[in-house]
Image (spheres, rainbow, N blue to C red):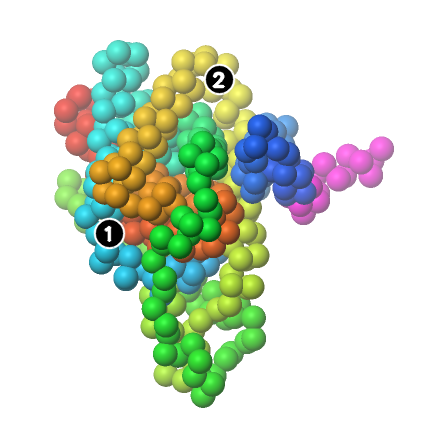
């Protein structure tokens, strides 16, 4: 009996048991749709509600690992894609901001939510922690923003993960034909240069370089006025660093590219760590918040997520004429949703969509950091 009780307090055992259960749950087919790696989030919520704790550094490191690998994959095609779809990326991001702002105003005026609570729900629905930080700066740490964020965050992740799987099925999309519409990466001159020094065969060195450089970039704080600052954070810095490292291809005689055979498993492991820590952290609050505020707050968050996703996708796909998978990639970026990008890569079977995500995510993050201040000016505190 003492052995069984000991397992419950064994952090390593509980973490990897949750991952095992999460991956297994993610394989279950629900009417043609699977949770995939996001199954880890569901299991982590359950284990978290039962008392499991996961150190925050695991989530931070996981997100950095995932986005660094995404950046390294997207780097070669990023510049080409940005030139071809620059205004489309801006329009998609603006669509998200308009939808987010509009639904917050509705939540305050129609559902009579306090402004700080509504802004917290918005941050969760958009899966943007940086936006929550701005709200806390405006209202203080004791505001209800964190409560709204915790409740809306779970649906914010799951809704986009489901959306990127359902749309291709609903449209009966030809995966190969749609993939052919995505931009190809230019041929790298350093790719076949055998004179370059490879530090390690698998390319883990390159991933570590991108993460370390990303941490430095993410730590840079840019003042936005009024005492508010903006930083890309470890995750945002990692994707920018990954794109940069992959685009230059080498530093002197040192090769700075990593094969897909390395990037794919590390990417999946990174997002699993991120979902594990966030699910475990949200578990206790999720149950208590539902008990305190009822189902209405959850429905408001769900409404915000759905409206933002649909609006962004329609703008990207039909107004900006992006290819199907490109429009979905831009939508995941504008929603700052790393798990949904992972799901989309699984659906498409390649990582070309990562460049669409990478083009929108930093801009959307900046917008979602500034948006709470604008809404407080309009609605008051």
2 vs 1, front mark: 1
Q: Is residue 372 above or below residue 56?
A: above
- Report the magenta residues as a range: 1-17
Alpha-carbon distance for marks 2 and 1? 41 Å
- How crowded pointer 2 is (Cα within 10 Å; few <14, some 14-19, many 20+) is rated as some
Q: Is residue 300 left or right of residue 17?
A: left
Residue 140: x and y in percent read 30, 30
Quadrant of the snapshot with the N terminus: top right
Q: Is residue 171 magenta?
A: no
Residue 243: x and y in percent read 35, 62
The answer to whether any part of residue 58 appears in the image is no
Task: Please tell me which residue lies in front, 317 or 119.
Answer: 317
Residue beneath disc 2: 290
Rendered residue at 30%/12% (across/down): 111
Q: Is residue 8 magenta?
A: yes
The answer to whether any part of residue 171 appears in the image is yes
Rendered residue at 43%/83% (across/down): 193
Q: Is residue 245 above or below residue 222?
A: below
Q: Secondary structure at mark 1?
A: helix
- Of callouts 2 and 1, the N-terminal one: 1
Residue beneath disc 1: 85
Question: Picture quarter containing residue 28?
Answer: top right
Task: Please tell me which residue lies in front, 77 or 375.
Answer: 77
């Amino acid at each position: 009996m003492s052995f069984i009780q000991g397992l419950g307090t064994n952090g390593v055992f509980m973490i990897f048991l949750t991952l095992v259960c999460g991956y297994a749950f993610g394989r279950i087919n629900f009417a043609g749709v699977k949770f995939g790696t996001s199954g880890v989030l569901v299991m982590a919520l359950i284990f978290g509600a039962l008392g499991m704790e996961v150190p925050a550094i695991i989530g931070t490191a996981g997100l950095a690992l995932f986005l660094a690998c995404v950046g390294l994959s997207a780097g070669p095609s990023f510049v080409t894609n940005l030139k071809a779809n620059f205004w489309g990326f801006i329009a998609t991001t603006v669509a998200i901001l308009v939808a987010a702002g509009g639904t917050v105003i509705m939540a305050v005026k129609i559902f009579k939510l306090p402004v700080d609570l509504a802004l917290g729900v918005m941050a969760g629905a958009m899966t943007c922690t940086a936006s929550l930080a701005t709200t806390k700066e405006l209202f203080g740490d004791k505001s209800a923003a964190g409560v709204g964020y915790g409740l809306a965050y779970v649906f914010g992740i799951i809704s986009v993960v489901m959306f990127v799987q359902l749309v291709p099925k609903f449209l009966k999309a030809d995966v190969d034909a749609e993939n052919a519409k995505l931009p190809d990466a230019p041929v790298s001159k350093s790719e076949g240069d055998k004179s370059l020094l490879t530090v390690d065969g698998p390319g883990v060195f390159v991933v570590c370089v991108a993460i370390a450089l990303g941490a430095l970039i993410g730590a840079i704080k840019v003042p936005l006025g009024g005492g508010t600052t903006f930083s890309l954070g470890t995750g945002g810095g990692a994707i920018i660093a990954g794109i940069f490292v992959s685009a230059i291809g080498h530093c002197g005689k040192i090769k700075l590219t990593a094969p897909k055979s390395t990037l794919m498993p590390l990417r999946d492991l990174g997002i699993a760590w991120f979902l594990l820590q966030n699910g475990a952290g949200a578990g206790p609050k999720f149950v208590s918040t539902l008990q305190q505020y009822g189902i209405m707050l959850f429905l408001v968050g769900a409404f915000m997520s759905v409206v933002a996703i649909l609006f962004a996708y329609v703008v990207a796909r039909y107004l900006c004429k992006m290819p199907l998978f490109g429009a979905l990639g831009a939508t995941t970026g504008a929603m700052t949703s790393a798990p949904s990008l992972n799901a989309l890569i699984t659906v498409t079977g390649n990582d070309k969509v990562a460049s669409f995500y990478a083009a929108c995510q930093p801009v959307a993050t900046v917008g979602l950091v500034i948006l709470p201040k604008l809404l407080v000016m309009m609605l008051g505190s």
